[in-house]
Amino acid sequence: MTAPRNEALAECDSLIDFIAHSPSAFHVVENFAARLTDHGFTRLDLRDAWQVMPGGRYFLTYNGTSLIAFQIANGLLSGDGFRMIASHSDSPTFRIKPHCATTVANAMNRLSVETYGGAILYSWLDRPISLAGRVICKGDDPLRPEIRLVDFKKPIGVIPSVAIHFNRSVNEGAAFNKQVDMQILTQASASLKNLDITDHLCQILDIEPDALLDFDLYAYDPTPGCIAGLDDSLIICPKQDNLTMAFESYRAFVDTMDSETSKMLIILDNEEVGSGTKQGAASPLVKNVIERICAKLNLDLETSQRAVYNSFLVSADMAHAIHPNHPELSDPKNFPILNGGPVIKYNANQKYMTDADGAAVFKLACQKANVPCQSFVNRSDMAGGSTLGNIMTTQLPLRGVDVGNPMLAMHSTRETAGSKDPLFLRLALQKFLSEQ
Ligand code: ZN
């Protein structure tokens, strides 16, 4: 059975809108924080004392780029675990360097950048680029300076291609030097006044230059995503890896608020650079939160450990669909198709955490939701990627499964997926979170 078409497209509209308003990982987390607050979740601070109780709904953020929300059901007091879904808030992009303005021919200014994560570089060429992130301003407490989010919103520049007349072999494959070729052209004028990025930040935030201490500023593609295809079967949009997973897991999480299960929504930063940061999946952040919840509920060691061993993690990150022009890149049997439903990802060497036990739990959730389910395995002669689940299990010995929606052009600034799949995933995750 397939989901009603109009409902699936409405889900895509909501997703596209969320991504358009989430230009950096800081904005992703603040947008989820605002929505959770509207749903009656209480914000906790990792640095302050907590009050948590059964029946309560809470969330916390760390570094402004990772978020953990949880609901405590009575069952946790007797050793039941959490239904957990983990995704990531970051996407490949460019980070603006501290001293970033460079001038060419006394007539053009550029922003110099570092690449963040494994971006498909050519996908960034010749399209409007904007900037977003956070600015740190002087505050009263030297160890807790003021943090302001910033979004330039309008296109501020472009990374222009070299004309084919200067590079006749461009269509045989282009190589890019990240230092030279990825600088963002921001100004072109015969009478050039070099406008510093910090001047713009001060203007946008209405602060004096000496109040600005530092910034974490990233490039993004401000052209909104769209539904496409002769039959509206495609969604073409930036950052579907991994905001589709973050958004649909959030939707399923609030859809099932009234069910009698303990649940945890986990959205972590820095997956694209290996997760080895204080706010990433390799840190003890999630473990610390679970231990702290158990301590605040006065659970003894045995009950706390039973809660971990009775928990189950769905590690949610996008998956590779078979490519229309290069089907030979996929395994001949285990290739997901767009609009074929969520994908269970397998890897013999455990780059994905899936085993038969974990896959079975997710397959059952899909069956109960009447949602089709697919499998992905890399060709045996290709290495493939990894994701959150296997890294999190180095901190927490959780049962679980790696899943994702099928997509094309992963890590392009405009990624393509199936327009039915976001709703499919939401429905399957609802069952996973709520079924007793
Ligand atoms: Zn991802």
Image (cartoon, rainbow, N blue to C red):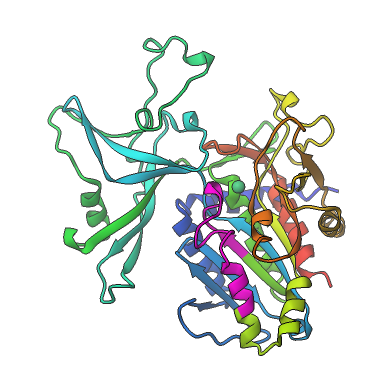
Can you give x and y, in whole percent of width and height, for residue 185 in the image? Answer: 30, 33
Q: Nearer the viewer, residue 255 or 46?
A: 46
Q: Is residue 157 above or below residue 288?
A: above
Describe residue 344's horizontal placement relative to residue 71 as left or right: right
Q: Nearer the viewer, residue 344 or 295?
A: 295
Q: Residue furthest left?
A: 191
Q: Is residue 259 visible?
A: no
Please report the residue visible at 48 percent of the width from the left and 32 percent of the height from the top: 121
Q: Nearer the viewer, residue 80 or 150?
A: 80
Can you give x and y, in whole percent of width and height, for residue 265 in the image? Answer: 64, 66
Q: Is residue 387 above or below residue 186?
A: below
Please report the residue visible at 43 percent of the width from the left and 26 percent of the height from the top: 176
Describe residue 417's horizontal placement relative to residue 117 as left or right: right
Please report the residue visible at 65 percent of the width from the left and 60 percent of the height from the top: 392
Please report the residue visible at 47 percent of the width from the left and 11 percent of the height from the top: 169
Numbered-mark total: 0
Quarter location, residue 233: top right
Quarter location, residue 259: bottom right
Quarter location, residue 110: top left
- Does 262 appear in magenta? no
Can you give x and y, in whole percent of width and height, for residue 374 in the image? Answer: 81, 44
Q: Nearer the viewer, residue 20 or 348?
A: 348
Q: Is residue 35 visible?
A: yes
| Image quadrant occupied by the C terminus | bottom right
Q: Is residue 258 above or below residue 169?
A: below
Q: Which residues are magenta?
A: 266-291
Can you give x and y, in whole percent of width and height, for residue 37 in the image? Answer: 53, 74
- Does 270 appear in magenta? yes
